[in-house]
């Protein structure tokens, strides 16, 4: 016997289905001690001793996993003689009796006995799987997602170790077509910590079954971290295909039509992102120059010298920057702000406005900060500029003072034109926001804000990494903990593949790339010429030194 006595009894299915439908934010079921304890302990022992796991990482996940468990008999991938109990469990999970039990509880219809996919997945400190709904156009036959935990039965998993399963509610939004589509809420509403011999499953629905695996957290001790293994057998059961027992052609046709419609609606969510940035004008301030003048004037230098490091206003240094930008279409200037402003920002952060505490700026929500979304594509806090520099931004905050002053000035536009060599005489405005990427939460997986090229993107990075300390060491650590801004020219389907939690080695081969780690007081700029250029920010780990804070500008040329 594999499963606990009575688990698959037909008489209990009505009550289990009632419990399944009553759960929120979407129907799911959690069953503790689903498998015979002695057998699952043997399975875990075999896995730990004999199963080879492969490390895999992309912009959505970082994980160690086996190949498909259907291939256990393949000696090139497994040692089947050493995995008899894992084989027994796999066969039981794929049995007609278990599939019929799942089908009846979830109501998804007949499930295939040949097309299921399952693997052994393990998350160790630093590993995670960001929010997704288990659906993509290339996997339209998935019907049930499941997880069977194999964590240490004698050392119960603690919630403070992370690694929990987070479930997200969906909210209705109206697309430009008039269709009502579902977007994931930016915050999870249910948390399920891992537990040995716990079975979790749910019917897969595009745009509705959003979930993620929280980052497994480090203990700070290498030896301890090696034993912190969030292990589980997980995967999907697929809709029955022609030739499968229980296949019904009429039901299959109707089911396919329903799922295709859900996928169509999900695709419409692309135009519903937040924030929807607006173009704010460059303001002349006290300069007499015309808005369309692209030459840097003495008055510009005088004004900008209050903010920008003096060496960046010297003609030779600007010529050097222009030459570098002409060769690489990128720019890195550090330090960017002058010593006075650098000290002002340092004092502000050290004075209690810790970036790592959420950079509430006294209170994120009451002071105008919002959460970018939808979270299957991006999540970060932002403050958007919707007016010119004359707007009444709170001047007690030096970050906002920079935003409402020099960065919106025509003098800054002319300086940008000078150091990049780009003609900005017809650039009357820009898209401008402040962003905060919180540790253990935030990222950008899909660039939703690019305009038709060419476009100049610049980032004033104010992340307190190495602030008043070793900047080189801080940068090296940042490479390992994420929050890295990346521009890559890729194939159009790369990010969509990532959303599905699947890795396709042949997709998205880089033809050119740019990376900028979180830094203190650095201005970076990138010229976007290609419509396929994606500007992303990698997930920022809980192990990072602090949150990533920056001001992002986009100038359409």
Image (spheres, rainbow, N blue to C red):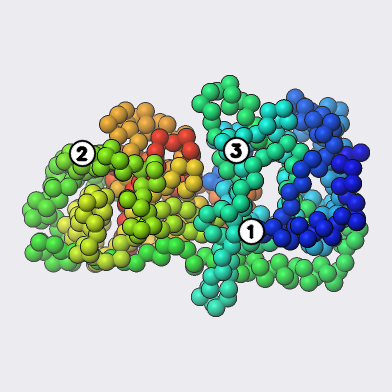
Q: Residue at x 33, y 33 (%)?
A: 466
Q: First in sequence: mark 3 or mark 2?
A: 3
Q: Circle 2 sits on which residue?
A: 343
The local secondary structure at tag 3 comes to helix
Residue 390, percent from left and from top: 19, 64
The local secondary structure at tag 1 comes to loop
* Disc 3 residue crowd, few under 14, some 14–19, many 20+, Cα 10 Å: few
How far is the residue under mark 1 from the one under mark 2? 47 Å
* Disc 2 residue crowd, few under 14, some 14–19, many 20+, Cα 10 Å: few
Q: Circle 1 sits on which residue?
A: 25
Q: First in sequence: mark 1 or mark 2?
A: 1
Q: Residue at x 70, y 34 (%)?
A: 151
**With 65 as the anchor, is 215 left or right in this view?**
left
* Disc 1 residue crowd, few under 14, some 14–19, many 20+, Cα 10 Å: some
**With 432 as the anchor, is 211 left or right in this view?**
right
**With 202 as the anchor, is 288 left or right in this view?**
left
Q: Residue at x 88, y 67 (%)?
A: 248
Q: Circle 3 sits on which residue?
A: 159
How far is the residue under mark 3 from the one under mark 1? 21 Å
The local secondary structure at tag 2 comes to helix
Using the image as rendered, state which of residue 193 and residue 495 is in the foreground: 193
Q: First in sequence: mark 3 or mark 1?
A: 1
How far is the residue under mark 3 from the one under mark 2? 40 Å
């Amino acid at each position: 016997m594999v499963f606990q006595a009575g688990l698959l009894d037909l008489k209990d299915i009505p009550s289990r289905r009632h419990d399944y439908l009553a759960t929120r934010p979407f129907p799911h079921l959690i069953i503790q001690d689903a498998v015979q304890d002695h057998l699952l302990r043997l399975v875990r022992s075999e896995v730990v001793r004999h199963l080879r796991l492969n490390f895999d990482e992309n912009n959505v996940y970082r994980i160690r996993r086996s190949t498909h468990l259907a291939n256990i008999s393949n000696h090139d991938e497994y040692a089947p003689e050493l995995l008899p109990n894992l084989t027994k469990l796999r066969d039981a999970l794929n049995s007609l009796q278990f599939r019929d039990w799942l089908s009846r509880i979830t109501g998804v219809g007949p499930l295939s006995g040949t097309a299921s996919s399952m693997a052994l997945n393990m998350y160790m400190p630093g590993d995670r799987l960001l929010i997704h709904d288990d659906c993509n156009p290339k996997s339209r036959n998935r019907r049930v997602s499941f997880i069977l935990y194999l964590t240490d039965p004698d050392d119960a998993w603690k919630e403070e170790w992370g690694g929990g399963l987070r479930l997200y509610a969906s909210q209705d939004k109206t697309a430009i077509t008039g269709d009502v589509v579902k977007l994931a809420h930016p915050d999870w509403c249910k948390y399920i910590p891992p537990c040995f011999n716990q079975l979790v499953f749910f019917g897969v629905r595009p745009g509705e079954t959003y979930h993620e695996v929280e980052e497994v957290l480090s203990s700070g001790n290498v030896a301890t971290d090696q034993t912190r293994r969030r292990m589980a057998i997980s995967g999907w059961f697929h809709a029955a295909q022609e030739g499968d027992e229980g296949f019904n052609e009429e039901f299959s046709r109707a089911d396919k039509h329903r799922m295709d419609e859900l996928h169509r609606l999900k695709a419409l969510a692309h135009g519903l992102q937040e924030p929807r940035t607006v173009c704010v004008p460059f303001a002349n301030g006290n300069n007499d120059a015309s808005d369309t003048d692209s030459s840097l004037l003495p008055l510009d230098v005088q004004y900008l010298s209050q903010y920008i490091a003096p060496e960046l206003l010297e003609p030779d240094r600007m010529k050097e920057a222009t030459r570098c930008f002409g060769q690489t279409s990128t720019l890195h200037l550090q330090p960017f702000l002058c010593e006075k402003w650098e000290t002002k920002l340092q004092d502000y952060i050290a004075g209690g406005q810790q970036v790592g505490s959420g950079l509430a700026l006294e209170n994120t929500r009451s002071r105008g900060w919002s959460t970018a979304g939808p979270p299957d594509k991006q999540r970060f806090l932002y403050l958007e500029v919707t007016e010119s520099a004359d707007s009444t931004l709170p001047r007690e905050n030096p970050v906002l003072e920079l935003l409402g002053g020099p960065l919106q000035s025509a003098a800054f536009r002319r300086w940008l034109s000078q150091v990049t060599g780009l003609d900005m005489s017809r650039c009357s405005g820009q898209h401008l926001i402040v962003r905060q990427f919180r540790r253990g939460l935030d990222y950008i997986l899909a660039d939703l804000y690019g305009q038709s090229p060419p476009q100049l993107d610049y980032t004033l990075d104010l992340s307190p990494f190495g602030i008043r300390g070793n900047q080189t060491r801080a940068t090296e650590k940042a490479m390992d903990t994420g929050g890295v801004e990346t521009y890559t020219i890729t194939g159009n389907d790369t990010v969509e593949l990532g959303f599905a939690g699947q890795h396709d080695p042949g997709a998205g081969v880089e033809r050119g790339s740019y990376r900028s780690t979180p830094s203190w007081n650095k201005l970076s700029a990138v010229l976007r010429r290609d419509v396929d250029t994606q500007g992303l920010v990698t997930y920022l780990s809980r192990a990072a030194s602090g949150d990533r804070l920056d001001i992002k500008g986009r100038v359409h040329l």
